Image (cartoon, rainbow, N blue to C red):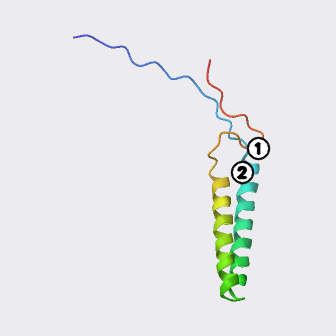
């Protein structure tokens, strides 16, 4: 019966998520712009059918753009350089 040594301890990785205030400010900005978009669309819907259709088409694109900005898909966000490989 062979004995295996325990696995090696993984290397410590520093995570730089200390931009709490900037993140909060960005999320509040997202909520504010989303609210303005929804209320602006609702107001345009009271003007008639054609302005309502145009407002809904524009609002759809604006809201998707706001959502994609908040997903942080890309590693570069404002002044960040991304994660460098270890070594």
User: What is the tally of numbered marks visible in this picture?
Assistant: 2
First reached walking from the N terminus: tag 2 or tag 1: 2
Question: How many C-alpha atoms fall within 10 Å of the one at disc 1: few (<14), some, or many (≥20)?
Answer: few
Residue 50: name its quadrant: bottom right
Residue position for label 2: 23
Image height check: is 20 above or below 3?
Answer: below
Q: Which residue lies furthest to the left in this view?
A: 1
- For the point 67% across and 71% down, the residue is 59
- For the point 65% across and 39% down, the residue is 75
Work out how far the residue at label 2 is from the one at label 1, CA to CA, in angstroms: 11 Å
Residue 56 pos. (x, y %): 65, 75
- For the point 69% across and 89% down, the residue is 48
Foreground mark, 2 or 1, reads 1
Residue 70 pos. (x, y %): 66, 54
Label 2's element? Answer: helix
Question: How many C-alpha atoms fall within 10 Å of the one at disc 2: few (<14), some, or many (≥20)?
Answer: few
Residue 71 pos. (x, y %): 62, 51
Residue 66 pos. (x, y %): 68, 60
Residue position for label 1: 78
Image height check: is 82 above or below 37?
Answer: above
Q: Residue furthest front?
A: 50
The reply to whether callout 2 and callout 1 are in contact (CB within 8 Å) is: no
Given residues 32 and 42, the one toward you in this image is 42
What quarter of the picture does the C terminus occupy? top right
Given residues 39 and 57, the one toward you in this image is 57
């Amino acid at each position: 019966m062979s004995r295996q040594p325990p696995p090696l301890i993984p290397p410590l990785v520093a995570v730089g998520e200390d931009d709490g205030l900037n993140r909060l400010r960005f999320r509040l900005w997202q909520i504010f712009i989303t609210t303005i978009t929804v209320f602006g669309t609702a107001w345009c819907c009271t003007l008639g059918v054609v302005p309502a259709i145009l407002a809904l088409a524009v609002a759809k694109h604006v809201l998707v753009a706001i959502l994609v900005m908040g997903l942080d898909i890309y590693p570069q966000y404002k002044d960040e350089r991304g994660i460098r490989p270890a070594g």
